[in-house]
Image (cartoon, rainbow, N blue to C red):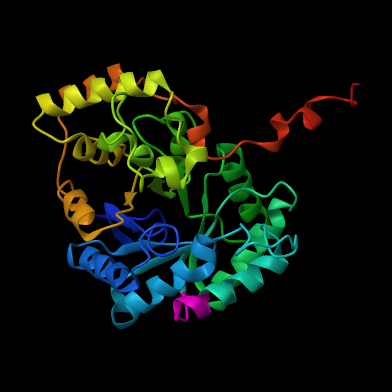
Amino acid sequence: MEYRRLGSTGLEVSRFGLGTMVLGAWGNTDRDACSRIINQALDGGINLVDTADMYGAGENEQIVGEAIRERRDEVVLCTKFHHPVGDHGDPTRRGNSRRWIMQAVDNSLRRLGTDRIDLYQAHRPDPDTPLAETVGALTDLVRAGKIRAWGTSTFPAEELVGAHWLAEQDGAVGPQCEQAPYSILCRTVERDVLPVARRHDMGVLTWSPLSGGWLTGKYRRDRTAPADSRASTNPDHFDGANEAKFEAVEHLTRIAADAGLSLTHLALAWNVEHPAVTAALIGPRTEAQLTDLLGAADLTLSTDVLDAVDEAVPAGHAINPADIGWTPPALAAAHRRRRNTP
């Protein structure tokens, strides 16, 4: 397993990280099996483990904390805040405000059973909270030793630039990592987010490098999607009628076959080829899936293969813009019109 510098954090992380969202209530409900998956990943050379407080209403953090308890010093532990934890309508227990950040971090530390988080990430932007407030609160957590570094997830480039500008003006700590939606089928971050990350020496973790299962080949025109796939568990992120995706996947499958690779391995090796990307987050639900994914850990692709992928899906392009993962509120009608119309 190759290890890479995670931006300016001082941390070295594996080129694949373990995303744990589907371990627990949102996927594999066998907690012993989840623990085995996490430890198998560590044994396979992965040292970055990523979770979030919202996954399974906090259960996922508990699963991760229990699994790594005896190996905590081996792990670069990452979690996130922003979304509500559990089903509630309390507006004070969500977002990126100082009030919620200070409460959320203590809740995560308790569930994880640790005294520090290596990378604490804002899960999404919060237009209702001044960015300076968020930067200031996270800076205080770094200085208090509760977190080692902080980052963002699915932030647009302008928010990243703004956070760095505020940190410079206020003598604060800026974001040191962005967790971006990135796959062969969703390449929009190549336009701005990845160049901004390089300019500011930020690490980049990529989420959904297999596009929710599309780049494993499990979704086909002539086959019903598996009952336990994202098509059923996350139907809002599954666009099974997207002919352009089917065509792209068929094209990519041929490219992979010509290169002697599975489509899954092609997609993962491609993902970590971009010079701005530090690590791709893989999210296995079973031990067998993890074994397969780790098979791509040391793969590199030739220029010819990379060129062929670019022909299948052009640089900077997303086949389905919804895969970007966040829509700016400014695009809503209420923010684009001076007054309501009848």
Of 118 and 331, nearer the camera is: 331
Quadrant including the C terminus: top right
Q: Is residue 124 above or below residue 157?
A: below
294 left or right of 76 in image: left
Residue 203 in the image, given as x and y percentages of width and height: 40, 51
Q: How many marks?
A: 0
Q: Position of residue 153 (x, y in %)?
A: 51, 49
Position of 129 compared to 78: left or right?
right
Nearer-the-camera pick, 1 or 268:
268
Does the magenta portion include 111?
yes
Residue 323: give x, y in percent of width and height: 48, 34
Q: Hey, which quadrant is residue 213 in on the image?
A: top left
Give the residue drawn at x 52%, y 32%: 322
Give the quarter of the image for residue 54: bottom right
Q: Do we see residue 143 in this rendering?
A: no
Task: Give the left or right position of residue 242, taking residue 90 as reference.
Answer: left
Front residue (pair 3, 209): 209
Residue found at x 16% / y 33%? 301
Left or right relative to 220: residue 45: left
Magenta region: which residues? Answer: 109-116
- Residue 242 belongs to magenta span: no
Q: Residue at 89% of width from left, 26% of height from top? A: 340
Q: Position of residue 69 (x, y in %)?
A: 34, 81
Placement of the N terminus among the 4 image quadrants: bottom left
Residue plotted at (8% across, 31% down): 260
Picture layout, residue 260 above or below residue 105: above
Residue 234 appears in the picture as rendered: yes
